[in-house]
Image (cartoon, grey):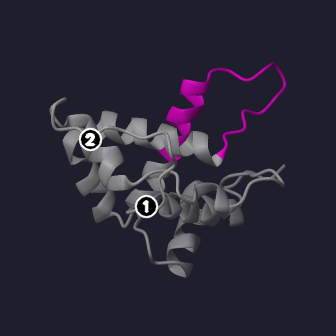
Amino acid sequence: MQTVNFEEELEKILAKDGRYPREAYLFVREALDHTQKLLGRPPKNEVRHVSGQQLLDGTRDYALGQYGPMALAVLNEWGLRRCEDIGEIVFNMVETSLLAKTDQDSREDFKGGYRFEEAFTEPFLPADKAPRRSSAPQTA
């Protein structure tokens, strides 16, 4: 099996698709690692698969932990404004073999996960200012 050089493949992605800077790709890669740790070790001889929704949840957790109240501003600076942006980065990395996917994985998995403004600001609002959550899914 040939080893993929992350930096070389990332350079190819950046040359082909300039929507997101290097920092956004590094962040998503770190968020994936964080998500895998949250999910725990896979059974022996199995590779841990992370679904789109699991990655979105892990990304939110990682961003809040790393950047606190500045998470939304940092992500926006990197062009990450909605869950679909995370999916675009993931699938850019899949296309260059930096990440793998199953036949069931698609960009659609990242649609409508959560609204960035709510996900990255509400945790820092005082309890009496935070909006009440409904059980209905949110769309962007």
For image coordinates 67% across by 52% down, the residue present is 99
Residue 23 higher or lower than 50, as above or below: below
| Residues in magenta, as a range | 29-51
Which quadrant of the figure has residue 19? bottom left
Q: Look at the numbered disc 1 and give the secondary structure of its residue.
A: loop
Marks 1,2: beta carbons within 8 A: no
Find out whether residue 38 is within the magenta segment: yes
Find out whether residue 47 is within the magenta segment: yes
Q: Nearer the viewer, residue 113 or 2?
A: 113
Q: Look at the numbered disc 2 and give the secondary structure of its residue.
A: loop
Q: Which residue is mark 1?
A: 82
For image coordinates 21% across by 47% down, the residue present is 70
Q: Nearer the viewer, residue 96 or 90?
A: 90
Q: Amino acid at mark 2?
A: Pro
Q: Is residue 110 left or right of residue 121?
A: right
Which quadrant of the figure has residue 105? bottom right
For image coordinates 53% across by 57% down, the residue present is 112
Q: Nearer the viewer, residue 57 or 136?
A: 136
Residue 75 higher or lower than 15, as above or below: above
Q: Is residue 72 left or right of residue 96?
A: left
Q: Which residue is mark 2?
A: 131
